[in-house]
Amino acid sequence: MKTCLVVDDSRVIRKVARRILEDLSFRVEEAGDGSEALSFCRSSMPDAILLDWNMPVMNGIDFLRHLRADPGGDRPVVVFCTTENDISAIAQAIESGANEYIMKPFDSEIVQSKFAEVGLVAPV
Amino acid sequence: MKPADFEFVSTMVRERSGLVLSADKTYLVESRLAPIARKDGFASIDDLISAIRVRRDAKLIDAVVDAMTTNETFFFRDKTPFDIFEQSILPELVARKRGGTIKVWCAAASTGQEPYSLAMIAEAMGPKLGGCKLEILGTDISERCLEKAKAGMYTQFEVQRGLPVQMLLKHFKKEGDAWKIDDRLKTNIRYRTMNLLDDFRALGKFDVIFCRNVLIYFDMPTKKMVLERMAQQVEGPGYLLLGAAETVLGVTDSFKPVAGSRGLYVQDPSKLGAKAAA
Ligand SMILES: C[S@@+](CC[C@H](N)C(=O)[O-])C[C@H]1O[C@@H](n2cnc3c(N)ncnc32)[C@H](O)[C@@H]1O
């Protein structure tokens, strides 16, 4: 079973994402900000990360840059999931090492479609 | 809605578009007709239907038929047909055509995601097209859908279904809340209203026909009739791509399946010859 770390400061969003990802057969772990997520990854690398952008303590982009610089940190597939929906923000996320990008609001169909895009689940 | 009214509407829709509405679709018909009734100032669906019975107003009838179409589509839908197009069909046609024009017909183009996906593939292939030019014709019975296809404006939801984010960055610009597709991709696509039940010989010949997720709504004789006329519109031999739930098997032998490529069919010229001779 693949593990997906959901990083979002909103408990509600984490819960929604958890339900969707569990339906897609992921084991789900949660982190409330980038620095919590980084500690999690340093003890055990997940297969996938669903990542919010704006969070307290450490935001998603900073987390991603740290992660990609870590040993083994190139392995997880990172899918941003954020209200940021400007072209420049999306481009910045991809340049920083994100594999896919979801603009909120999202639903299970979008998550499945994007996860399929990066080979995490079978095509829709 | 009275059973007699349902009967009247479903017969009319079927005669005009081939779309089959079974009796369990009463609710669907009601929910799709209500907005038309409201928009045209009728007090109820019953009034709308009475008016159509009496006046046979072509505009109203078109609106009803259009409302009964299912326009669901998304970029790179089902992925496989697009991989086949890129990896098998285009290389074969490029070798065969030597710099000529490759003509593709999206016969149920809906809101344009299918033709635009093909245009994105062609653009990414660049020099591998060997100087060939891709010309895409997108047709649909729904003018409303084609207007949207022409505008090339999509919602945030639509650009997240099937479209890889790199493609979004490469081919779209944000305009307010909407996403607008690159004008460059539009240059090789034409859109035109076309009912598949009508004579489409004037469209000319094509190398590839995408006819996906529309035949499922037709009955067997209509499927057969459409496919056999399509077999006359391709040459070379020409290719046909159907939707994931569609096949030519048991419908017609004017196209035959291509082994190893799900959803891909190739025209069978021997069958065509036989028909012409008959
Ligand atoms: C489900 S969409 C398929 C769109 C696209 N080919 C795809 O696979 O994603 C079906 C389309 O067929 C169109 N359609 C239905 N009956 C038709 C007819 N008789 N002639 C032409 N188009 C028709 C509808 O308007 C609708 O846009």
Image (cartoon, coloured by chain):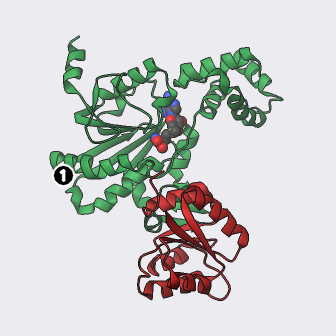
Q: Nearer the viewer, residue A118 or B43?
A: A118
Crowding around mark 1 (Cα neighbors within 10 Å: few <14, some 14 to 19, many 20+) is some
Residue B139 position in % (x across, y down): 45, 38
Q: Is residue A46 above or below residue B202?
A: below
**Res B203 → quadrant:** top left
Question: In the image as oriented, which residue stretches furthest toward the right?
Answer: B43
Q: Is residue B258 left or right of residue A37?
A: left
Q: Which quarter shows the N terminus of chain B?
A: top right
Q: Colour of chain B?
A: green
Q: Secondary structure at mark 1?
A: loop
Residue B85 position in % (x across, y down): 31, 48
Q: Is residue A101 above or below residue B91?
A: below
Question: What amino acid type should be assigned to the residue bearing mark 1?
Answer: Gly
Q: Is residue B237 above or below residue A29?
A: above
According to the picture, the residue beneath numbered tag 1 turns out to be: B99
Residue B157 in sight from this viewpoint: no
Image point (59%, 60%), residue name: A22
Q: Which quarter shows the C terminus of chain B?
A: top left
**Res B157 → quadrant:** bottom right
Image point (41%, 79%), residue name: A74
Looking at the colours in the rendered structure, which chain would you say is drawn in red?
A
Image point (48%, 84%), residue name: A67
Question: In the image as oriented, which residue stretches furthest toward the top?
Answer: B278
Q: Is residue A91 left or right of residue B144?
A: left
Residue B129 position in % (x across, y down): 23, 56
Q: Nearer the viewer, residue A23 or B91?
A: A23
Q: Is residue A63 left or right of residue B33?
A: left
Q: Is residue B89 left or right of residue B73?
A: left
Residue A111 in sight from this viewpoint: yes
* Chain on which label 1 sits: B
Residue B195 position in % (x across, y down): 48, 29
